[in-house]
Image: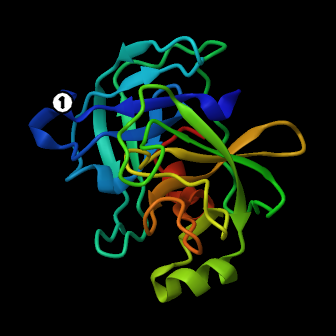
Amino acid sequence: MKFRILSQVFCSDCVDLICMKISTSTLIHNKWLLTAAHCFKRSGPCAPSITTSEPALTVFIPSTATQVIVHPAFNGTNMDHDVALLELMVPAPMSYTIQSVCLPSPVHRFLKNAECYITGWGSMREGGSLTNLLQKAAVSVIDQADCQQSYGNVLTASMMCAGFMEGGRDTCLGDSGGPLTCRQPSGQWFIAGVTSWGHGCGRIGYPGVYTRVTSVRKWISAYLPF
């Protein structure tokens, strides 16, 4: 299933301390990964590993990234436009378990009743340790006005919320940069958001906040060949 195809960036493999911490990224093309800008100190080379996500199989395929492109409008204070692109030197070996996820158009709308999932290797609870097995959880897209009541004006137009206002399921430490993906009636999986920030993990009234991919779609198109 396309939403389960991810890559993981390991800080210990990065050049010149460019990577700040372990993060997750999503394959959106055989040579491009989408992730969060706050995972990096600046643009430059890095060395991620493409990882399949079959429950009983974890395969790391090292592939040096020739460049890390942080969104020019990224604001490290309020996390606005928290998104970055990684270009791989060698294309990822596409297969049944390694596929790219679809990118939405700038005007695409993800409905509240859409089938959506979050995935990552982050902590399974607030204050917990990272997991070695890729996790996934079903979540709902939350209305922007409802989420605004929780986060106020900190929530910008380039951000979106997903999860549950009653708490429980959420992304957590170590999931940054990973995907919020939703299945369309056609059966295709689209990446709706990039895991960015939130207040704690799974807290009541504070769902996870994601960079809205439709808001940065034109910027992505400036680098990708489609």
Q: Is residue 2 rendered to the left or right of residue 28?
A: right
Above/below status of 10 relative to 174: above
| 123 lies above or below 170 | above
Tag 1 residue = 12
Task: Give the structural element (helix, strand or loop) at label 1.
Answer: helix
Q: Quadrant of the N terminus?
A: top right
- Give residue 131's position: percent from left, percent from top: 42, 32
On the image, the x and y values in percent for residue 140 come to 73, 58
Label tally: 1
Work out whether residue 37 or residue 54 is closer to the camera in this orientation and state it: 54
Quadrant of res 197: bottom left
Residue at image position (45%, 39%) is: 25
Count residues near mark 1 (Cα–Cα under 10 Å), then give few for <14, some for 14-19, many for 20+: few
Residue at 56% across, 54% down = 170
Based on the displayed image, in which of its 4 quarters is residue 2 positioned? top right
Q: Quadrant of residue 189?
A: top right
Residue at image location 35% in from the left, 55% down from the top: 37
Residues 145 and 199: in front is 199
Out of 147 and 203, give the one closest to the viewer. Answer: 203
Residue reaching furthest to the left: 16
User: Which residue type carries mark 1?
Assistant: Ser
x and y percent of residue 9 in the render? 33, 33
Residue name at image x 43 percent, y 64 percent: 200
| Quadrant holding the C terminus | top right
In the picture, measured across the screen, residue 82 lies left or right of residue 54, that is: left
**Rendered image coloring scheme:** rainbow
Q: Position of residue 76 (x, y in %)?
A: 29, 68
Q: Residue 154 vs residue 144: left or right?
A: left
